């Protein structure tokens, strides 16, 4: 593997050969998505870290929740926009386009979610995620109550906080390592 093929600026080539279960996971990604996301390729130098990352991601983003998959992707985009994470704005902006069927919504969330035509629930959710990203130490009960008033349960608030927290962490890792999104994301669902 050449340096050009590495998904980050770090020289951390993947385990070679990948364990059978990891290769199967990558094959499923290739079949479903048409690519192996570079974030997974970035973690492939350490299969235990890859498995931990993937398990947490899959639980937060794909498991049953009072939040739709689109809402979770919207949080990912807004947090990533505030943090200016090129990887996640690109990858999760594409997911918003795919899940919403609206290419303009994905762009609005990347640039300034406040200009998007959001319902009260989505706006409150994204306002909370934004506050968590910029000023989490100021969050008080009235912020959580504002979420309850638009229909979120306490479990939903837990999920909002965890999705926003996860992307605040991954944004920093992606930025620090110059992780690059797969080129395919840029053209999808436009």
Image (cartoon, rainbow, N blue to C red):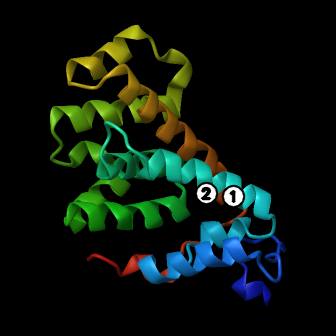
Q: Quadrant of residue 21?
A: bottom right
- Disc on res. 54: 2
Q: Quadrant of the N terminus?
A: bottom right
Q: Nearer the viewer, residue 55 or 93?
A: 55
Residue, disc 1: 51
At x 60%, y 52%, the residue is: 55
Whether residue 175 is visible = no
In the image, is 2 to the left or to the right of 105?
right
Is 60 located above or below residue 58 in the figure? above
Circle 2 SS class: helix
Coordinates of residue 11 in the picture (x, y in percent): 84, 74
Is 129 located above or below residue 63 in the figure? above
- Disc on res. 14: none
Q: Are marks 2 and 1 in contact (CB under 8 Å)?
A: yes
Q: How packed is label 2: few (under 14 Cα within 10 Å), some, or many (20 or more)?
A: some
Is 16 located above or below residue 51 in the figure? below
Coordinates of residue 86 in the picture (x, y in percent): 53, 63
Coordinates of residue 40 in the picture (x, y in percent): 63, 68
At x 65%, y 49%, the residue is: 172
Alpha-carbon distance for marks 2 and 1?
Answer: 5 Å
Coordinates of residue 113 in the picture (x, y in percent): 30, 46
In the image, is 132 to the left or to the right of 143?
right
């Amino acid at each position: 593997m050449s340096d050009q093929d590495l998904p980050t600026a770090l020289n951390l080539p993947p385990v070679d050969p990948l364990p059978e279960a990891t290769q199967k996971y990558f094959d499923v990604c290739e079949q479903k998505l048409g690519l192996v996301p570079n974030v997974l390729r970035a973690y492939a130098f350490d299969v235990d870290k890859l498995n931990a990352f993937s398990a947490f991601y899959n639980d937060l983003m794909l498991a049953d929740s009072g939040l739709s998959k689109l809402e979770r992707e919207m949080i990912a985009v807004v947090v990533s926009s505030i943090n200016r994470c090129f990887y996640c704005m690109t990858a999760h902006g594409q997911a918003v386009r795919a899940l919403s069927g609206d290419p303009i919504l994905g762009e609005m969330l990347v640039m300034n979610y406040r200009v998007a035509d959001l319902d009260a629930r989505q706006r409150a959710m994204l306002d909370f995620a934004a506050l968590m990203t910029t000023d989490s130490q100021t969050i008080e009960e009235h912020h959580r109550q504002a979420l309850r008033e638009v229909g979120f349960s306490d479990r939903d608030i837990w999920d909002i906080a965890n999705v926003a927290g996860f992307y605040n962490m991954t944004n920093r890792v992606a930025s620090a390592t110059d992780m690059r999104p797969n080129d395919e994301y840029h053209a999808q669902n436009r």
